[in-house]
Amino acid sequence: MNQDFLPLNGTDYVELYVGNAKQSALFYQYAFGFELIAYAGPETGVRDRASYVLKQDKIRLVLTSPLGPNHPIAQHIQRHGDGVKVLALWVDDAEKSWLETTSRGAESASAPEVIKDQFGEVKVASIFSYGETIHTFVERKNYTGVFLPGYRPRKSTYQPTGIGLKYIDHCVGNVELGQMNRWVEFYENVMGFKLLLTFDDKDISTEYSALMSKVVSNGNGYIKFPINEPAAGKKKSQIEEYLEFYGGPGVQHMAIATDDICHTVSELRRRGVEFLEVPSSYYDDLLDRVGKIDEDLQPLKDLNILVDRDDEGYLLQIFTKPVQDRPTLFFEIIQRKGAKSFGKGNFKALFEAIEREQELRGNL
């Protein structure tokens, strides 16, 4: 067994650059049930940006906005709209993680540094991934503060109830035509990930469009990154639409795990989150396709939740519509009942649902 040169404990946080962090923070609290736990900004001595840290179970989202038009974050938002900038990885040794990856060809985004406050110290270092996305290695074993040095605890007077979101199951990246294998090799060679699954245009296609996808995973399986690229089709694929509106490669969606998808999705719908719709005919022969499941079919049909089975079990999943005006970032809600796969049997139904939305936007 090869020694894992980049042991990862899981996702530390995901940071989104957004046009208005204060308002976005309230959206994620209200609609997704996140709790505001920390803040950095002018009141805490940070002069150029404001960041809100939201938490639910093991998930931490950081929403950051610049405080002036010439800031690099402002340029990022101008180009990409709201989107994921940092996929931060929790490690035991940030400097070693940075050295191991940069020595294998990663481009450094920021060299290792120690940041301190009265609660101890955190070591961080970052490397570039696809597009302008970065991975930050976070070593926090000598830290007892709320999030990172520079952040102060912050609570909201609005106290949302959580909706059962547990942890980030996987994060999907969209890259340009011909670039998927390059980035798969990056994760294999630079970060020691293994190729888990491959989907080609025969697996993921409709009459009009297609994509290719490969899934890479780290050694313990805590971090999984599917990478998509467009494939030739009669019309513009969802990946091409994303690349056009995001202005290049980036994170397409975050899949978040729940133990009770019916409760989670009922709450999201009640709070105004919109989902892709598959036709009711999807459910006509569902049990013939996937076999026996623990759930009653009617609530799944009412909520438009999809089901797929693999050799190890089954999964339930649903996809939101984009959560900002550009047709870019969205969320997947997933409940695994043994299945380790990604819902291959649902790709066609999902694609057709996405194409219906693209057509409404005039982008198909």
Image (spheres, rainbow, N blue to C red):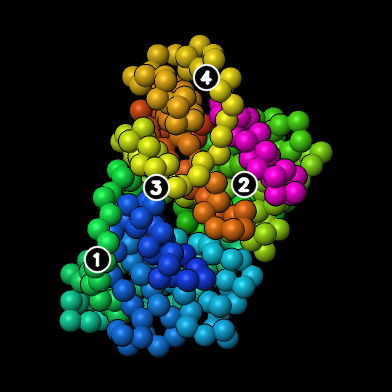
Give the foreground label among 3 and 4. Answer: 3
Q: Are marks 4 and 2 in contact (CB under 8 Å)?
A: no
Q: For residue 157, which numbered disc appears in the image? A: 1
Is disc 3 placed on a helix, strand or loop?
A: loop
Is disc 2 placed on a helix, strand or loop?
A: strand
* Residue positioned most to the right: 234
Residue 358 is one of the magenta-drawn residues = yes
| Residue 312 percent location from the top left of the image | 40, 24
Give the foreground label among 2 and 1. Answer: 1
For the magenta stretch, what is the residue range? 344-364
What residue is rendered at 38% in x and 73% in y? 51
- Disc 3: which residue: 271
Q: Earlier in the sequence, mark 2 or mark 1?
A: 1
Q: Earlier in the sequence, mark 3 or mark 1?
A: 1
What's the amino acid at mark 4?
Tyr
Distance of label 4 from label 1 (alpha carbons): 42 Å
Residue neighbourhood size for the residue with mark 1, other residues' Cα within 10 Å, grouped as few (<14), some (14–19), many (≥20) = few
Q: For residue 283, which numbered disc appears in the image? A: 4
What's the amino acid at mark 2?
Asn
Q: Earlier in the sequence, mark 4 or mark 2?
A: 2
Give the foreground label among 2 and 3. Answer: 3
| Residue 133 percent location from the top left of the image | 54, 64
Give the left or right position of residue 43, taking residue 88 as reference. left
345 in relation to 269, above or below: above
Give the foreground label among 4 and 1. Answer: 1
